[in-house]
Image (cartoon, rainbow, N blue to C red):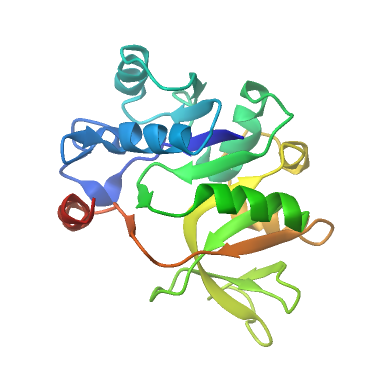
């Protein structure tokens, strides 16, 4: 499998830690979020990582170039325009082989999700997209129908008869997805497109134990992650 690490965001919630660096270079116990995730993905069998860059993009490009990584790390350059997750996917598509599933991972997510089990589930299910979910308290949830297919967004769509599940910031997609996304000439959120695609293709979920999982999105979460990891 290959991987796409989403690292282009502005890191607004992490300020003041992101006043002088991208969130990917915020450190947990002396290692940057990007370093932690690249090493973990390589250990799980990822053959190449693509990292998108925008905020402090030059700094992040230099950081990536100056390190020896356990797998090739390529840059999806969004320095001219931040494309949101939706636009980021087709923009990065040419950097992937097109032959293997792509693990999509937010750079500010740290977890012990079993990535090998995710890959096995994704392949066996026949899903076009498999979204990692878990049982935890949050208002940021996706809605799935009785067959386990994506059917809505909690708080935006009618949830009657649907199951709300929190998204964990990690997913796996088949490379055929990229051609089904709108063009990358403008930024757009990914889940609106996913809901349209789910009418014709299966977008399911992989339920993982809560275990060690944290969204390192605030300075307080950084302190918690220093203890958890």
Rendered residue at 30%/19% (across/down): 63
- Pick the residue in front: 60 or 87: 60
Instruction: Give the position of the N terminus as an image quadrant.
Output: top right
What is the x, y in percent for residue 44?
49, 39
- Pick the residue in front: 190 or 112: 112
- The outermost residue toward the right is 200
Residue 86: quadrant of the picture? top right
Rendered residue at 62%/73% (across/down): 143
- Pick the residue in front: 144 or 205: 205
203 relative to 9 in the view: left or right: right
What is the x, y in percent for residue 154?
55, 74
140 vs 122: above or below: below
Rendered residue at 22%/34% (across/down): 31
Can residue 127 be spotted in the picture?
A: no
215 vs 148: above or below: above
16 vs 157: above or below: above
- Pick the residue in front: 84 or 147: 147
- The outermost residue toward the bottom is 160
21 relative to 79 in the view: left or right: left
């Amino acid at each position: 499998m290959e991987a796409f690490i989403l690292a282009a965001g502005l890191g607004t919630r992490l300020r003041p830690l992101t006043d002088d660096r991208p969130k990917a270079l915020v450190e947990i116990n002396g290692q940057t979020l990007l370093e932690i995730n690249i090493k973990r993905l390589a250990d799980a069998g990822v053959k190449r990582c693509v990292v998108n860059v925008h905020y402090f993009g030059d700094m992040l490009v230099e950081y990536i170039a100056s390190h020896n990584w356990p797998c090739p790390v390529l840059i999806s350059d969004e320095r001219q325009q931040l494309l949101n997750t939706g636009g980021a996917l087709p923009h990065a598509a040419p950097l992937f082989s097109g032959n293997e599933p792509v693990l999509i991972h937010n750079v500010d997510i740290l977890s012990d999700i079993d990535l090998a089990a995710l890959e096995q589930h994704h392949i066996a299910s026949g899903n076009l997209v498999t979204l990692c979910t878990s049982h935890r308290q949050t208002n940021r949830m996706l809605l799935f129908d009785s067959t386990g297919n994506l059917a809505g967004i909690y708080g935006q769509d009618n949830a009657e008869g649907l199951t709300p599940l929190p998204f964990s910031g990690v997913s796996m997609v088949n490379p055929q997805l990229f051609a089904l996304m709108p063009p990358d000439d403008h930024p757009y959120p990914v889940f609106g497109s996913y809901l349209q695609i789910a009418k014709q293709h299966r977008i399911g979920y992989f339920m993982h134990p809560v275990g060690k999982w944290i969204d390192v999105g605030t300075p307080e979460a950084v302190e918690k992650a220093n203890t958890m990891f």
